[in-house]
Each structure stands twice: as structure tokens, then as C-alpha cells.
């Protein structure tokens, strides 16, 4: 089974020196190719948009390749610096947002615009893994608490931007690293209990009006069928009307007649559901599950605590991406702006995700001889 | 808590981590499974439901208005048709700045404030991509002005639609009625699905009475629309069923002749074919142009029509209620014979007035010096009033009232036009109920000469004369002769309704009255002798003069001294030819003066027009 194959370093060829994990690479490539086909339909058969997405994908795959070459040790050395500067940039964005009076996520670097929150998606699991790897597992309570602070501070800063989707991803990235580190289950259940009052406090003091409205709409989409409930209603109609086999590629009425909003970005999953049916979706989910399980296998085969925690954290972040997006589009979760990884039209999240996969490949392909 | 080992234990750490990885893998599988369950419900269990919703999203049902039926006269002359007209419509979603656009349009063509008001109201109800009419019936010049400026008026369109047109204008306004925009009150009573695409509805006359037949059945088209509602293509079409065409009994020639004969007078004329109850002409003057109402009349024009002293909107033929005057004397004469209270040769002495016992008041005859000895025939020919004072007193109001009601007085004729008035035939019961007073004998007297409380519409009068001509067979007047399916041309005749006949035991009594009425026109002493010159047929008629202005006991009625609007109404009823009646006419000329002098010549012209051929002989087909 390719999911569990060992790296073949004995073969005399150039391939091992590329530091790529071929099963993972194939999975990602299939996903990207399928995504382009869906995007062609969702964009209203726009060659221009597909070409732009191909460019982005090329850049992202290139970045993955670059990250695959960086050894885990190098990564580890750079971690505190990356995290620290990321935090500073976040603060800078926030201050600029205060001045500009409004939502601020971007940092304009002249040549290209840069989202510090995207950078934190990698920096947070790196930093938490770095910190927890210093002592033997499982970590003591003090380390757990500091670990929580490490991911909570950037998460709160991003939530303040406000970008609830990314904050959620960063929160879960950090939390998953903690869980992989052996966070006691009793503490997990205690936190879960604590989550109830925390949610209430967040509801009353920590959320913007539009965020509260989104949650309310999620709980009852029919209450506002033409306003914020419109997204959920139209996406469930699109998916539901797709049935088992779908309406066929380019034949989705919900998307092609523009009933489905955000059809080429956050709600592209509904287009898949409408045009390819449950069977198409099962294929997509199987691909996602294959990628996740392959990454978990890579993490389990990692040689030290840092790489193990990092691998596990990055993998679960990817899972959260997939689940939150599909959950949102199918009406299981409130609408938070999380794209469907590698399928949704758009660049920044794709770049960080592919960088993460590059790191995972690096973990798998840079192996040291173990001291016995 | 875990008891952490002070030293690193790689095997233990590896074991711990692998366990967590397995949990993570199971967690991932569980989440994916959870999503699959949700999708199973969406795509398999509730698939039908969402398919319906998806279809409803994209498929819109649009109604298509049926073409309104046409209206013809009895000879196939078109009276109401549908003409293409141009209207200016606005699609709100394509207009950037509505106010600026409206201002620009008003600089190009005239848009009244009421048009603006209506436009703003419709705007609130319609969706943003639907055309909303601003101005209707654009002239060719206005169409051109908009057309050359279209580049700077996005969202403004010229639309062609069918509008009702009455080519003969005012000639038949009171018979045909007119269509107008559906108002809120009508909207509540309508079958809204059938009227989904219809903007106009019959407001009065035939257009209103036969609305159901004329309207037709709405058609539908299923169209595919995008999220903004724009139509992308037509999926399926159910064509509308056009309304049925109507063929009227009205003869436009006769209508024109009647209108010409009445000239500038105010009044009404109704002509009925006694053989089948067909209404041949229905004239009410002055009239108005019904075309003004089709697309909404502006308020200034409406006020001018509605507040005019001449009351052009008032349908005198159906709703004008006049004292019948002497025109009903033949009917009381018939009742006298039938009841046995008089014989044809019964004579009374008329010295010019009648005095009721125990009453000082003199009930005067129109002829100051009196008619001398008067029998039934003379009473009708010379229209002796005293004869009918005595006869009325003998008959009593109860018998008079019952008999007149049988002839159709005091109740609607049942004509196939909505809104006719019922007139008034007084009775003891009526007076007690309405005036809370007993009936006085003096009131019986003046009822006997068609004055007092008695009121009749010209239509009622014509219908009663037709009934008299038919020997009591009672038919409701009938305007629409037949319905015609617009596709197949199949005609369904609509015959007149039979009403309970007036029963007369001795048939000779009909003949006696007919003879007396014939003498009204043909004898040298008849009150309508002025029209008997060169008559190609015999006419049975009766003149009448209805008082508008009550004169005091010791005053004389001198027409010249009395303002025109207080002068007597001139009336004339007639049927011809006497032996085989084919036309019955009732004429009322408001404030016209004497019936014989003013009203009878008008009736003669109408009868000539109908009965004579080109050479002035009786039409062969009517013999």
C-alpha cells in the first residue's frame, strides 16, 4: 500500500534527491487537476481564471518543492525567528487597521501584498512544536499553558482583524500540536467544559455584529433567505439537487445561472456536489482522506519530537480546512471564510498549504541514521 | 497527571505519539464520515426536494395576456378592436439614476404628474428587472424622440402592445362602454391567475357585462431565468386562448341616424325589434369618446366630463329616469278594457279640467277648453287627460300598479347591460314604506297621465312598447346577438330572455289599442299627425310630454317664459309596421317641449332608416 511505503533511498537515481514524497505528490497533483476542471465550470467557463489559477498552483508547487529541500533541523533553527517576526507583522497590520479604520489583513509590500496571518498558519504549529520538543513528552502543565499562550495570542490578534476563519485554523493548528504531544484527555474534556462559558463570553463581548449574524443565520437560514441565509440555502439546493450522479460537468443550473454565490471561491464544493453528485464528492473526499492519512503516516515515521508534532499539526490543520469548508457549504457549520484547499480559486491559502506539504515531504525524506 | 520521566525515553515517546496518530486518523475518518452522512441526506434522501427548489429557482412561469375579443354590429361593422400602441417602459435595474432618467424623459416627452405618481406606485410592487410602464399611447413623434436619445437613457424601452380602440368613438360609448386599467377594488374580485398578464378590464357597458367572454384565457410560458430573474430562454409555452368576439344586435346605421336626428338635443333613443327583443339602437346624448378612458384619462379631462352640466358620462337610455307622461295612456286604456271598467264606446265629458270630490283642486287637461265627448279611441288619439283622470280613479292605484309592473315598469328590464335603473311604479305599499304616508286619490289621478311619482327609463319605455306590439309577449331587451369563437368562428346565438307575458283575456283589446295608436299618427286629429306625410308603412305611436316644472293652479305654462332646463321633456313611443311590427322606438328629448312636434319626427327618421330600402319602399326582408 502506497500509503505506508517506506522511502526508497537505495534506488540509484536522481529522484530521491528531489526530496519529494511521491504518493503525497500524486495525491496533491490529482486534487489540483480535478480542482481546475471544477473551476472551469464554476467560473462560467473562463479560460482566463483557470490560467491564473494554474499560475498560482505552479508557484505553490514550486514553493512546496523549495520547502521539501529545507532540512528539518534548519526549519527548527529558524522557527523562533519566523514566529517572532510573524507576530510583529500581525501587530503592524493591526495598528495600520486602527489608523485606516476598518478590516485590515494585508500588508502592502509594493511588489506584492502579504498576509501575515497566512504566515502564522505555518509559524504557529512550528513554534508550538519547537517549544514542546524541548522537554520529553508528555509535556508538564506549565509547558502546556505556555504552549496555549503561543497559539492563542496570534489567534486573538487575527480574530481582531477580523478574520474568524484564519483565527480558527491557527487555534486548531496549535491545539492539535498540543494533542499530539500527549495532552492528557482529562485536560481535553476539562477544556471542552470550559468552552461553554467561553463561547458565551465570546458571543457577548468578542464578536462583531456581522459575525453574530452569521452564526444566527447558520442556526436558522430561513430567517433571512435573501440576506446572509441566502448562501447556505442556495448551496444546499445546489448540492441536494445534484443527487447521486450530479447534473454533469458544466450543467449545474445553480452555479451557471448564478444562484450560487461565491461559486468559484469558498462555495466551490457546492458546484462539485451539483455537477458530479455524491459519487464525485466521495471521490474528492477519498482523495482528501488519502492525503491526510499519508501525512499522518509521514508524521508517525518522523524521527524526532519536533518533526512528529509539526507533521501532525500541519496535517490536522489541513483536515480542519477541509472539514470547515465542507461543513460550511453543506450547512453543518456557520459561514466562515475558509476556502476548499487546492480547489477554491485564490492564492494565499494555497501557497501556505503547499509550503506545509513541502515541510512534510522534507520530514519524510531527510532521514538521519538513528543512534541506538 | 502523567508522571513524566526525567530522562528522554524515545520508545515511550514514540509509542505515545503513535497512539495519538491513530486517534487523529480515526478522528479524520469520523469527520469525513460525518460529512458523508450529511451529503447522503442532502443528495439522496432529500434529493427530490432540492431538485424542486432548484427548478423553482431557475424556471419562472410568465403569464401571457390573451387578445380581447372584438365587437361587431349586426352587419359586421367593427365597433371595438385592438390596435398596437407604443408605450414607454423602464427596467429599474438597468437605470443608474432613476430621478435623472425621469427628468431626462420629461424633457423629451410630456409625462403628466398622475403618470409619474402611478409609475412610482407600480415601481414598489414590481421586481427590479421587470418593465414598468411610464407613459402609454406614445405618438409617432414621441417614439422618435425617445429612439434618438436611447443611448443616454439605459433601461428605457419602447414597447408595443395591443390597446383597445373604438373606431366609432362617441357613437356607441354608452352601449359598448369602455375598458380601463384594473383598479385595486377590481383586483380583489378578479380571478388573479387568469388576469395575471391583463392590464385592462371592462368598466361599463357591453365591455363590462361580457367581460368573461371577451377576456379569454391566460397563456403561460415557462422560462429559464438566472439569479437576477433575466429570461434566458423559453422552455415551454401554453398559448393564451383569445376572448370571444361579440356580435351585437345594434345597427350602426340606425344608431347614426338616431344620433343625427337628435342633433344637439340632450336625450335618449332606444329602438327594439319586437320580433326578437333585439336592441337595434341605444342612444344617449350628449356622449363622450370612450378611447379617452382606455389608458387612463388625465384628471383635467375627467373632471371636465364628470362635472359638465350636460352630463355626457350619464347613460340616459339606461339610467335616465323620466316621468313617462301620456306615453303610457294606451296601457291604462288596455287595463280599463281588460278589467271591464270601460268599453271602447264608453264616453266621458271633458270640459278642460277634473275636480275630485271633496277637493277644490282642478286637475287640468292639457287642452284648456277640453275635448268634449271623449271615448277610448279619442282619448288616445288626442291624448285627453280628463279621460284618464276618471279611468284612473275607477281602476285604483293597486290595479294600475300591478298591471304596469307586468309591462316592466318599476323594475329592471333584464337587458344584458350592467347597471340599468329600475324606474319607479308607485303603489300604496311603496308610499307607506318610503314616504310613511297613505296613498291619496289625487295621486292616483296624476299617475293616470304618467305624472306624479312614476319614473321610467327610455329602455323601459321602448321595452314596454315592444311588449305591447307583441300582444303581451314579454322579452328582455337583448344587446348581444351572438358569441363567436375567435379561432373557429363558431357562433353561439344569445336569444332574448322570455319574461312572464302580460295576459289579456280578450285579444281584441290589443287590436283596439293598436288601432287607436295608429290613429295617433295617421288620423288628422292625432297628436303625431305631423309625421304621417309620405309614410310607406303604418305607425302606431303615442306622444307624451313630461312635466319637469310644477306650475301653480292659476298659472299658465308658457314655454318661452321658462328656462330651457325647466321646460317639459318631449316623449314619443311607436312601433311599425302596425300589422307586423319590426321596430319599436322610444324617444325622449330633454326639455324639448311637445312630444308630437319634437320627439315624433326623430322616431320617424329612425324608423325610415330601418324599414325602408334605397328607393324608399318597405324592405322586402321585413315584410
Image: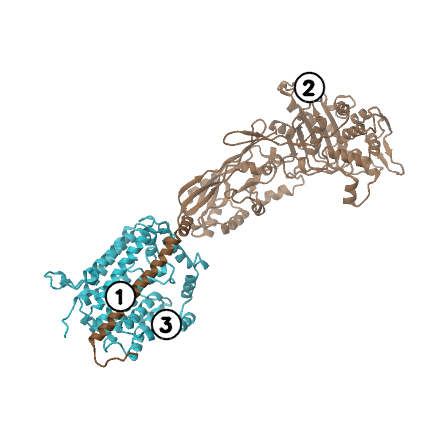
Chain colours: A cyan, B brown
Label 2, label 3: how many angstroms apart (C-alpha)? 113 Å
Q: Which corner quadrant of the image does residue B619 belong to?
A: top right
A99 displayed left or right of B21:
right
Give me the C-alpha separation between circle 3 and circle 1. 22 Å
State the image coordinates of residue B66 (x, y, percent, origin top left): 50, 38
**What residue is shown with label 1?**
A315
The residue carrying pointer 1 sits among few (fewer than 14), some (14 to 19) or many (20 or more) residues within 10 Å by Cα, namely many
Identity of the residue drawn at 77% across and 36% down: B401
Q: Is residue A249 above or below residue A122?
A: above
How many residues crowd around disc 2 within 10 Å: few (fewer than 14), some, or many (20 or more)? some
Is residue A302 something one can see in this rendering?
yes
Where is residue B16, by image quadrant? bottom left
Quarter that holds the C terminus of chain A: bottom left
Find residue A228 and name its label.
Answer: none
Is residue A260 at all visible to an observer of this figure?
no
Chain of the residue displaying label 3: A
Residue B536 disc label: 2
Q: CA distance from mark 2 to mark 1?
A: 114 Å
Can you identify the residue that label 3 sits on?
A192
Amino acid at each position: 500500500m502506497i500509503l505506508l511505503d517506506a522511502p526508497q533511498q537505495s534506488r540509484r537515481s536522481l529522484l530521491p534527491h528531489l526530496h519529494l514524497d511521491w504518493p503525497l505528490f500524486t495525491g496533491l497533483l490529482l486534487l489540483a487537476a480535478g480542482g481546475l476542471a471544477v473551476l472551469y465550470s464554476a467560473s462560467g467557463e473562463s479560460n482566463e481564471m483557470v490560467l491564473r489559477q494554474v499560475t498560482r498552483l505552479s508557484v505553490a508547487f514550486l514553493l512546496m518543492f523549495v520547502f521539501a529541500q529545507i532540512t528539518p533541523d534548519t526549519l527548527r533553527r529558524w522557527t523562533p525567528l519566523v514566529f517572532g517576526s510573524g507576530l510583529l507583522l500581525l501587530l503592524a497590520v493591526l495598528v495600520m487597521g486602527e489608523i485606516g479604520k476598518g478590516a485590515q489583513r494585508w500588508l502592502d509590500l509594493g511588489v506584492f501584498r502579504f498576509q501575515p496571518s497566512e504566515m502564522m498558519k505555518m509559524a504557529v504549529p512550528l513554534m508550538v512544536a519547537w517549544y514542546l520538543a524541548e522537554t520529553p513528552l508528555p509535556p508538564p502543565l506549565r509547558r502546556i499553558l505556555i504552549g496555549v499562550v503561543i497559539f492563542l495570542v496570534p489567534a486573538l490578534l487575527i480574530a481582531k482583524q477580523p478574520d474568524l476563519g484564519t483565527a480558527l485554523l491557527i487555534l486548531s493548528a496549535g491545539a492539535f500540536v498540543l494533542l499530539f504531544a500527549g495532552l492528557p484527555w482529562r485536560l481535553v474534556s476539562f477544556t471542552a467544559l470550559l468552552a461553554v462559558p467561553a463561547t458565551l463570553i465570546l458571543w457577548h463581548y468578542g464578536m462583531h455584529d456581522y459575525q453574530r449574524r452569521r452564526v444566527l443565520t447558520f442556526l436558522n437560514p430561513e430567517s433571512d433567505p435573501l440576506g446572509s441565509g441566502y448562501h447556505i440555502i442556495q448551496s444546499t439546493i445546489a448540492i441536494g439537487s445534484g443527487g447521486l450522479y450530479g447534473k454533469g460537468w458544466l450543467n449545474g443550473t445553480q452555479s451557471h445561472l448564478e444562484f450560487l454565490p461565491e461559486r468559484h471561491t469558498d462555495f466551490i464544493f457546492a458546484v462539485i456536489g451539483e455537477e458530479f453528485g455524491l459519487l464525485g464528492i466521495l471521490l474528492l473526499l477519498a482523495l482528501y482522506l488519502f492525503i491526510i492519512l499519508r501525512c499522518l503516516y509521514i508524521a508517525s515515521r518522523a524521527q524526532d519530537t519536533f518533526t512528529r508534532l509539526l507533521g501532525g499539526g500541519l496535517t490536522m490543520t489541513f483536515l480542519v480546512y477541509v472539514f470547515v469548508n465542507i461543513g460550511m457549504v453543506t450547512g453543518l457549520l456557520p459561514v466562515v471564510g475558509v476556502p476548499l484547499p487546492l480547489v477554491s480559486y485564490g492564492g494565499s491559502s494555497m501557497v501556505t498549504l503547499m509550503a506545509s506539504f513541502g515541510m512534510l515531504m522534507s520530514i519524510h525524506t531527510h532521514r538521519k541514521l538513528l543512534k541506538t | 497527571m502523567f508522571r513524566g520521566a526525567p530522562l528522554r525515553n524515545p520508545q515511550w515517546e514514540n509509542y505515545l505519539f503513535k497512539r495519538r496518530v491513530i486517534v487523529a486518523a480515526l478522528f479524520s475518518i469520523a469527520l469525513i464520515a460525518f460529512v458523508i452522512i450529511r451529503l447522503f441526506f442532502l443528495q439522496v434522501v432529500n434529493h427530490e426536494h432540492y431538485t424542486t427548489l432548484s427548478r423553482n429557482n431557475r424556471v419562472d412561469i410568465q403569464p401571457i395576456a390573451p387578445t380581447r375579443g372584438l365587437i361587431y354590429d349586426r352587419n359586421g361593422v367593427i365597433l371595438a378592436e385592438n390596435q398596437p400602441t407604443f408605450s414607454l417602459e423602464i427596467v429599474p435595474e438597468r437605470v443608474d439614476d432613476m430621478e435623472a432618467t425621469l427628468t431626462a424623459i420629461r424633457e423629451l416627452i410630456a409625462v403628466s404628474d398622475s403618470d409619474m405618481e402611478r409609475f412610482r406606485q407600480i415601481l414598489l410592487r414590481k421586481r427590479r428587472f421587470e418593465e414598468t410602464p411610464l407613459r402609454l399611447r406614445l405618438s409617432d413623434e414621441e417614439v422618435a424622440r425617445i429612439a434618438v436619445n436611447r443611448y443616454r437613457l439605459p433601461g428605457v424601452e419602447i414597447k408595443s402592445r395591443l390597446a383597445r380602440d373604438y373606431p366609432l368613438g362617441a357613437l356607441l360609448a354608452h352601449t359598448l362602454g369602455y375598458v380601463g386599467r384594473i383598479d385595486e377594488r377590481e383586483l380583489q374580485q378578479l380571478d388573479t391567475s387568469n388576469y395575471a398578464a391583463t392590464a385592462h378590464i371592462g368598466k361599463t357597458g357591453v365591455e363590462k357585462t361580457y367581460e368573461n367572454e371577451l377576456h379569454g384565457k391566460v397563456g403561460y410560458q415557462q422560462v429559464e431565468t438566472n439569479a437576477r430573474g433575466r429570461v434566458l430562454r423559453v422552455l415551454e409555452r401554453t398559448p393564451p386562448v383569445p376572448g370571444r368576439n361579440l356580435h351585437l344586435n345594434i345597427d350602426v346605421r340606425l344608431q347614426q341616424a338616431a344620433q343625427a336626428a337628435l342633433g344637439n338635443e340632450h336625450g335618449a333613443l332606444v329602438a327594439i325589434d319586437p320580433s326578437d327583443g333585439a336592441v337595434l339602437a341605444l342612444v344617449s346624448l350628449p356622449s363622450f369618446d370612450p378611447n379617452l378612458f382606455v389608458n387612463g384619462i388625465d384628471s383635467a379631462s375627467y373632471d371636465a366630463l364628470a362635472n359638465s352640466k350636460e352630463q355626457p358620462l350619464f347613460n340616459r337610455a339606461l339610467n335616465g329616469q323620466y316621468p313617462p307622461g301620456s306615453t303610457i295612456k294606451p296601457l291604462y286604456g288596455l287595463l280599463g278594457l281588460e278589467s271591464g271598467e270601460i268599453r271602447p264606446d264608453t264616453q266621458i265629458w271633458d270640459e278642460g279640467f277634473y275636480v275630485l270630490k271633496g277637493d277644490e283642486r282642478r286637475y287640468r287637461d292639457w287642452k284648456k277648453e277640453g275635448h268634449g265627448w271623449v271615448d277610448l279611441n279619442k282619448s288616445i288619439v288626442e291624448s285627453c287627460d280628463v279621460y284618464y283622470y276618471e279611468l284612473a280613479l275607477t281602476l285604483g292605484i293597486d290595479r294600475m300598479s300591478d298591471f304596469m309592473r307586468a309591462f316592466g315598469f318599476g323594475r329592471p328590464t333584464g337587458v344584458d347591460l350592467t347597471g340599468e335603473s329600475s324606474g319607479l311604479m308607485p303603489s300604496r305599499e311603496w308610499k307607506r314604506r318610503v314616504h310613511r304616508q297613505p296613498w291619496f286619490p289625487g295621486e292616483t289621478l296624476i299617475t293616470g297621465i304618467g305624472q306624479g311619482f312614476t319614473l321610467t327609463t327610455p329602455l323601459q319605455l321602448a321595452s314596454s312598447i315592444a311588449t305591447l306590439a307583441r300582444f303581451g309577449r314579454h322579452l328582455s331587451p337583448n344587446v348581444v346577438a351572438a358569441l363567436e369563437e375567435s379561432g373557429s368562428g363558431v357562433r353561439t346565438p344569445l336569444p332574448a330572455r322570455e319574461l312572464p307575458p302580460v295576459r289579456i283575456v280578450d285579444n281584441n283589446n290589443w287590436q283596439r289599442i293598436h288601432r287607436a295608436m295608429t290613429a295617433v299618427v295617421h288620423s288628422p286629429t292625432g297628436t303625431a299627425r305631423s309625421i304621417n306625410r309620405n309614410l310607406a308603412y303604418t305607425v302606431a305611436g303615442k306622444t307624451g310630454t313630461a312635466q319637469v316644472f310644477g306650475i301653480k293652479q292659476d298659472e299658465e305654462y308658457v314655454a318661452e317664459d321658462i328656462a330651457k332646463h325647466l321646460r317639459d321633456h318631449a316623449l314619443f313611443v311607436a312601433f311599425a309596421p302596425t300589422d307586423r311590427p319590426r321596430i319599436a322606438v322610444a324617444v325622449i328629448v330633454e326639455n324639448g317641449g311637445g312630444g308630437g312636434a319634437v320627439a315624433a319626427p326623430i322616431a320617424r327618421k329612425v324608423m325610415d332608416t330601418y324599414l325602408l330600402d334605397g328607393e324608399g319602399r318597405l324592405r322586402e326582408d321585413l315584410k
